[in-house]
Amino acid sequence: MGERGLLLTFGADAEDRAAREAVRAADAALGAAAPGWLLEAVPSYVALLIVFDPLATDHEGVAAFIDAMAPAGGRAPAPKEWEIPFCPANGYAPDLSEVAARTGLAEEEVIATFCAATFEVAMLGFAPGYAYLAGLPEALRLPRKSAPVPSVARGSVIVAGAQALVMTLDLPAGWWRIGRSPMKLLLPEAEGVSPLSPGDAVRFRAIPAAEMPS
Amino acid sequence: MSGLRVRAVGAVVTICDEGRPGRMRWGVPASGPMDPGGLAALRRAVGPGPAIEVSLGGLEFAVEGAPCTLAVAGGGFEVRRNGLDVSAPCAFGAFPGDVVRIAPARRGGAWAYLGAPGGFDAPLWQGSAATHVSSGLGGGVLEAGMLLRFGAPRIDYAAQGPIPVPERPAGPFRLVLGPQDRHFPPEAIGTLLSAEWRATARGDRMGMGLDGPPVRPDGALSIPSEPLVRGAVQVNGEGRVTVLAADHQTAAGYPKIAVMVAADHGRFAQLRPGDRVRFRAVTPKEGVALVREGDHPIG
């Protein structure tokens, strides 16, 4: 990818859990080996981008290093578990009634189904701290809206396709808003920007509006 | 309190430094200058510290509180101090009460860099004052009325005068094909490399759309969101081409037919709407060789 990048692909389907695990294993192995030419590695659903210093190596050198590394096998660090509180009350969930209508569920069933699911952080990307959460239950899957909403408030819990995401910034989004979380998922001064890492498990817990910061 | 009081400012004039590379795994692009060579030229005059990236919208300010050397480098901009042209790119003394206006000159260029010895006071985010425009994180976007405080104002006589700017190569912008070029028929690759493209006003710090013939992939592609880099040539469902820039999103599912070599990023960013663009393919090896020949610093 350009003169300083190599994109390793482990599959073609975002739903392919084994491919996601292979990406994380390669990322972990590369991070542990920490070759001097490594500028950064960027994991995603089925691909790992390796950005290297072209003064120190080249595409063939990186590919040879990866081939030599593979048999040893990388093991991703043990995933962490997170519980993200969110409020699905009026005012925080402008699309909840429409999600209920489109899925044929009652609003309470939408929230109960959502809170019963365990999500996996598939990747962070697009914008700072955006964590794509794989594992939205079948019953809640809807295509994204035909046009994005120009500004969706940070903290909004949004769903589309097989995914969920907690907005970290006020940005446009075409997914369905079913609540708002008070949890800080963008840590400006922390090491690493976000507390979440690919592979982590996430569950949501509904809280009443009284527990939301004013 | 001394600094620059903003009197008038166009869109997307921001605090800038070399950026925050190495954080794409958390969704954070490097940001930093649209034209790294322009900022590097400014550094040769006034050294490190947060600077200002001026867009085609221009900037006018009054100097307050203390005299300070100022420098302007980068694209074709005219700089007037109290109405008199100071012949940018250059460094010059500015004194309390002076009014300085930076506006696009007739000759080309889309981004200029304004700096002072010691830089300007600016909030850091993730170790850098570079502004990430869509979030507002980092130093931030300039607004009329605000005071940009000097970090350590001083007149630096040795720095004042013209800023030497190395000649830039002309000719086609160089692309390394891939990573999804295999999803495009040979005609599409041929179109990309032979057509005359036009820079457009559909450009900002995230990327620039080009006008030209459609470049269509084989069928509808469904690529799971995957990492992006600056310079990626992304093709949407209608075959329209966008080249990603400093504040690029870090992942997307559109196919990337090629990636522009970093050595050409600054020259590309300096295009104005309507400017002609041609591309030429280089091999990954040739891309690496360009870096090793010192055509462009890392980053």
Image (cartoon, coloured by chain):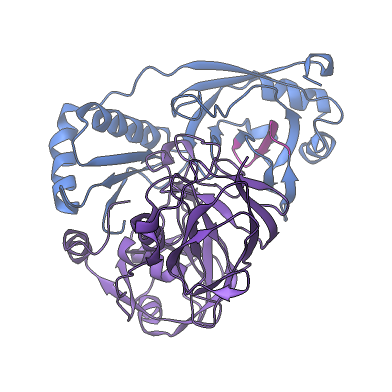
Chain colours: A blue, B purple
Residue drawn at x 78%, y 37% as measured from the top left = A99
Outermost residue on the right side: it is A90
Quarter-wise, where is residue B42 in the image? bottom left
Q: Residue A92 versus residue B32: which sits nearer the camera?
A: B32
Name the spot of residue B56 as percent of width and height, x first. 59, 69
Q: Is residue A161 magenta?
A: yes
Q: Which residues are magenta?
A: A153-163
Quarter-wise, where is residue B187 in the image? bottom left
Residue B139 drawn above or below residue B12 = above
Q: Is residue A90 magenta?
A: no
Report whether B2 appears left or right of A140. Answer: left
Residue A152 shows in the view: yes
Quarter-wise, where is residue A24 in the image? top left
Q: Quadrant of the N terminus of chain A?
A: bottom left
Report whether B168 appears left or right of B55. Answer: left
Q: Residue B7 versus residue A25: which sits nearer the camera?
A: B7
Q: Quadrant of the C terminus of chain A?
A: top right
Report whether B260 appears left or right of A209. Answer: left
Residue B205 shows in the view: no
Residue A19 drawn above or below residue B109 = above
Q: Residue B70 versus residue B259: which sits nearer the camera?
A: B70
Residue A23 drawn above or below residue B299 = above
Residue drawn at x 38%, y 64% as measured from the top left = B265
Q: Residue B94 versus residue A121: which sits nearer the camera?
A: B94
Name the spot of residue B1 as percent of width and height, x first. 63, 39
Residue drawn at x 15%, y 52% as measured from the top left = A60
Residue drawn at x 43%, y 49% as measured from the top left = B117
Name the spot of residue B78 as percent of width and height, x first. 54, 74
Name the spot of residue A151 as percent of width and height, x first. 73, 46
